[in-house]
Every structure is written in structure tokens, then in C-alpha cells.
Amino acid sequence: MTPMFICKHCHKLKPANPHLKGTQQYCSDPPCQRARKAAWQKKKMIHDPEYRAQQRDSLRTWRKQRPLDQYQRQYRLTHPDYVQRNRELQRLRNKKQSERLNVQKIVKMDALIKPTEKSNAYLMRPYHLDASGKIVKMDALIVQLTQFQSDIRPALPVFP
């Protein structure tokens, strides 16, 4: 009877290959072999600095030879159906988003929506100081800033 194993990627029970040394972890299906290679490469990148440097240099060389903007431009020129479909889908996404948010397009979309946990609200009130006997510019506005620590706002002090 041939020994069986459970593939690490597809989780199916498969017969082990008798020609392989050690414990087999992946079956011979192409997706499982891609997963095996990706796992090996990830481990190699973590533990082998020379391999990591070689991969980085190889990727830099590849990117210099194939700038991304030229690739995208060339792809769009050679695939007009893709361009048209993408434009239509983007119009639908824009329409759906504007309907959902019920705002005009001039609104800044990356503005902070929900408040942060720490309050960024401050109370600004005049600060009265005794200027008798000191050289102080009397028409300057001096204020005191107090940060709110919670949603409860402090009572405003009354100044004479």
C-alpha cells in the first residue's frame, strides 16, 4: 500500500511520491507547486541576506528596463475595450459613492470622518494679567488654550 499524505495547500489526501526523499508536504498539482515555491522563496528571503540582495538588485534592473508608466500606457493603447470598460465602471463607482454620501464632488474626500480618540478641540479664552509696573504691550491679545480631555465641555468662565 502506498503511503498517503495531506497536501499543505489543497488539504486533500494524496498518495506520496516514492521518489521524493523525506516527508512530502505538497502534491503535484500546479497551484500546490506554486504555493510550495512561494513558501520556499518567502523563507529564503527571511533567512538568506545574499539571496534577498540578489532579488532586490534583479527587481531594480527589471524595473529600469520596464517603467510602469510606459507599461500602463502601452497596455491601454493595445486594449481599447479595457479602457472603455474601466471608464464606464469608474463612472458607476463615482455615481454610487456620491449617492451614498449625498455630497457634491467638490467636497474633500480624504477628510477625517470620525473623531480620533484624543480630542483635538481647544477652548480659547482671554487671559488677563496684571501689567502694573511691567513693560507690557497693552493692546496685545493674550489667550489661554485648554484642551478638552473628553466629550464633556468645561463651563466657560465669566470675565469682568
Image: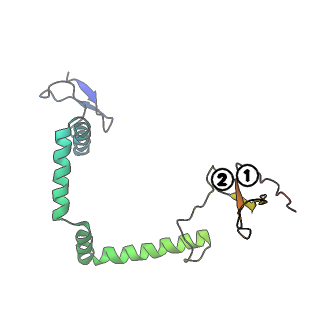
Q: Residue at x 20, y 28 (%)?
A: 16
Q: Position of residue 125 (x, y in %)?
A: 75, 61
The correct choice, above or below, for 159 with respect to 6 in the image is: below
Q: Is residue 73 left or right of residue 123?
A: left
Q: Amino acid at mark 2?
A: Ser
Q: Position of residue 58 (x, y in %)?
A: 16, 52
Q: Identify the image quadrant of the C terminus.
A: bottom right
Q: Which mark is residue 151?
A: 1
Whether the residues at callouts 2 and 1 have beta carbons within 8 Å, the answer is yes
Q: Residue at x 40, y 76 (%)?
A: 87
Q: Which mark is residue 33?
A: none
Q: Which residue occupies the foreground of this view, 8 or 46?
A: 46
Quarter occupied by residue 61: bottom left
Q: Position of residue 65 (x, y in %)?
A: 15, 64
Q: Farthest residue toward the top?
A: 1
Secondary element at image label 1: loop
Quarter occupied by residue 70: bottom left
Within 10 angstroms of label 2, few (less than 14), some, or many (20 or more) residues? few
Q: Which residue occupies the foreground of this view, 123 or 133?
A: 133
Q: Which residue occupies the foreground of this view, 82 or 52?
A: 52
Q: Residue under label 2, please give it.
A: 119
The correct choice, above or below, for 132 with respect to 12 in the image is: below
Q: Amino acid at mark 1?
A: Asp
